Structure formats: C-alpha cells, structure tokens
Image: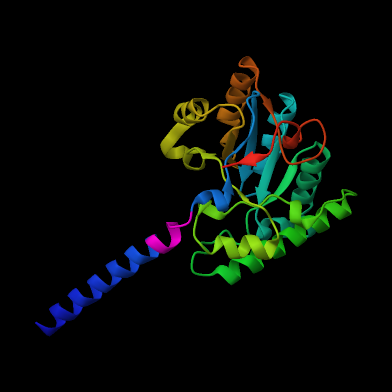
Amino acid sequence: MKKFKLKRVVNISLLLILFFSIIFNFSTPKVNYEVNRINTKEKIVMLTFDDGPSLADETILDILKENDAKATFFGTGINYKKYWTDKKIKMIVKRIIKEGHTLGNHSYNHNNYQFKTKEGFNEFYQTSEMIAKIYQENNIEKNISVIPVRMPYLQYYRGMDYIKSKMKIDYFVRGYLGCDYNESICGKNKILKQYKRNIKPGQILVCHTRDYAKEWLPDLLLYLAENNYKTANFSSGEHYYKNYGGLIF
C-alpha cells in the first residue's frame, strides 16, 4: 500500500513538472525568437538543408547547380570539424561556398538544449567560430553575428532568448519542416506533396542532407521553375534574401 501511494505521488509530481514546464517554455510568443519566411509577395523561397556537411551534400550540390538554385546548409560543428580532417568533406564545404550557397549553424552536437541553455550557447558559439574560420580560409569575409542559426529539431523554449542574446543574433531560422528525413516511411510522393503544398512567396523550406534527396529534389526544383519561383539564401549577391525583404515570423 505504501509503495502504491508513493508511486502515485511520484506520477502526479512528474505530471505537474511536465505541465509547468510546458507553460513556462511556451508562454512567450515565438515571434521573439524565430523567423519562418521572407516578408515578400514575390515568388521567392529559401531552400535549407540540415545536419551536414556530409557526403550526401555532393549530390545535392549537383542537383542545385543543374537547376541554378541556391541554398543554405545548416551544418553541425561535429561535422564542420571534419573540414580539417577529411579531404572529401573539405572539398564539399569549399564547393558550397564557391557555388554561392551559405553555411549555417545547427549547433555542435545536435542535442536537445531545453534544460542545458549554457551548454547550448557554448555549442552554437563554437560552431559559429568554426564557420567564420572556414570562411576566412576561403577568403570570404563573414561576421559571426550574421551566420544564420537554426535549433536542432526546431526545438523552441524560453532559454533560446538567452542564447540569442549571448550570440548577438536577431533570430533563429525556422521554416516548414517536411518528412524528407524519414524517407523509409514517407517516400518520394509524400515528401513532394508536403513541400509543394507549402510553396508560397517567402517560404523557408527545411530539408536534410540525405542521399534520398536525389529522388525528390529534382522534381521539387522543376515544380518551382514551372511556377516561376526563384531561390534565395543568406549570401550576398543576386540571391541575397534582403533583396526581397527582411525575415519575419
């Protein structure tokens, strides 16, 4: 009987902790932390690819080049570190830069930082420093404060405000997340259907650096071209998003 009562108290306590955690983390409007699109009526979208740099990026870069499209690659520090140890990854990263795409910050270890805010800041800062060093080595002047940052799993919580302030950035980049990361369940048709249904002026599309991109990305880019859509990213020049408007929630 005592064990039953103790278990019941523990369960109730856990439910209360979960409830107040949800209230605490979601009581502040997302607009303070994240952006989802470009503020434009022009037919412009942003393609973004998470979790690299990896060997899968090579195929993605081929497809983007064939379709004259630009993208932002939100990589992790643990993978950017391979730039100095893996010749193949170094070549891919250099190609991303050379072909006019943007390097983004997706944390170092791709963890959940909801209850590890200071650890999260350290990881994001370390990754931005790494990206800045890569840009410098490739004769590209980039300020750490303007490197786009995206939370792993698109997680949202109050501690993001601390990281945003410490990183001296204006926002985290969110966007529409499809299921391309789980191709064994979703498959080509569902992935394409999801992205096509969410194409609208200024939309940011969240994709992933996976080999399966070769199955659906050409069709998506063809669809964009047929509907007179162009692509934008965070790099200066013709495809710079600020040519069309600022980023908004």
Residue lying furthest left in this view? 1
Dominant secondary structure (helix, strand or loop) of the stretch shown in magenta: helix
Question: 170 left or right of 195?
Answer: right
Locate residue 90, reporting x and y percent: 79, 51
In the rendered structure, does residue 26 fall within the stretch colored magenta? yes
Q: Nearer the viewer, residue 49 or 164?
A: 164
Residue at left offset 82%, top offset 58%: 133
Q: Position of residue 186 (x, y in %)?
A: 43, 35
Can residue 47 be seen in this snapshot? yes
User: Percent x, y for residue 148?
Assistant: 69, 49
Q: Seen from this angle, which residue lies furthest right?
A: 139
**Residue under the image location 68 percent in, 39 percent down:** 246
Residue 105 among magenta residues: no
Q: Is residue 127 left or right of residue 182?
A: right
Numbered range of the magenta stretch: 23-28
Name which quarter of the figure residue 70 lies in.
Answer: top right
Q: Quadrant of residue 206?
A: top right
Left or right for 34, reference 83: left
Placement of the N terminus among the 4 image quadrants: bottom left
Residue 54 in sight: no
Q: Quadrant of the C terminus?
A: top right
Which residue is outermost to the bottom?
Answer: 2
Q: Is residue 182 rendered to the left or right of residue 63?
A: left
Query: Which residue is pictured at 65% across the width and 17% down the height?
Result: 228
The foreground one among 108 and 84 is 108
Residue at the image point whose x is 80% and y is 43% from the top: 97
Total label count? 0
